[in-house]
Image (tube, rainbow, N blue to C red):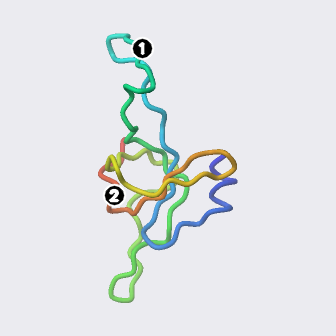
Amino acid sequence: MATSVSAKIQPLGDRVLVKVLEAEEKTKGGIVLPDTAKEKPQQAEVVAVGKGKVQDGKTIPLEVKVDDKILFGKYSGTELTVEGEEYLMLREEDIVAIVR
């Protein structure tokens, strides 16, 4: 799946295309959450990355790479729909951590 999308969409500069991971449907205690109670997910998997940020005429590569799982700011990015799938285009500065 990621291969076909990354072949069609190439992020520019310091942008990163991610597939948002689904929100948990149950709490740790086992309570099922209705759709209205779910928070916007803040974890995603990197699908494609740009070449990096240009600074002083040099390209600085991004720290994230394809298949990394990342955490991002709650209201970050631009939502995109490609072939019925939803993705998010972020700038690297909107990514707060790589999940190891």
- The amino acid pointed to by label 2 is Asp
Quadrant where the C terminus is found in the figure:
top left
> Alpha-carbon neighbours of circle 2 within 10 Å: few (<14), some, or many (≥20)?
some
Distance CA(mark 1)–CA(mark 2): 30 Å
**Which x, y percent locates residue 92?**
37, 62
Residue type at numbered disc 1: Val
On screen, residue 75 versus residue 79, left or right, reads: left
Instruction: Report x, y in % for residue 50.
Output: 50, 68
Instruction: Specify few, some or many for label 1: CA neighbours under 10 Å numbering under 14, 14-19, or 20 or more.
Output: few
- Label 2 SS: helix
Instruction: Choose top left, top right, bottom left or bottom right for residue 54.
Output: bottom left
| First of labels 1, 2 by sequence position | 1
Residue 94, numbered circle: 2
**Residue drawn at the location 60% of the way across and 51% of the way down:** 81
Query: In terms of secondary structure, where does tag 1 sit?
Result: loop
Q: Identify the residue under disc 1.
A: 32
Residue drawn at x 69%, y 49% as measured from the top left: 83
Q: Quadrant of residue 94?
A: bottom left
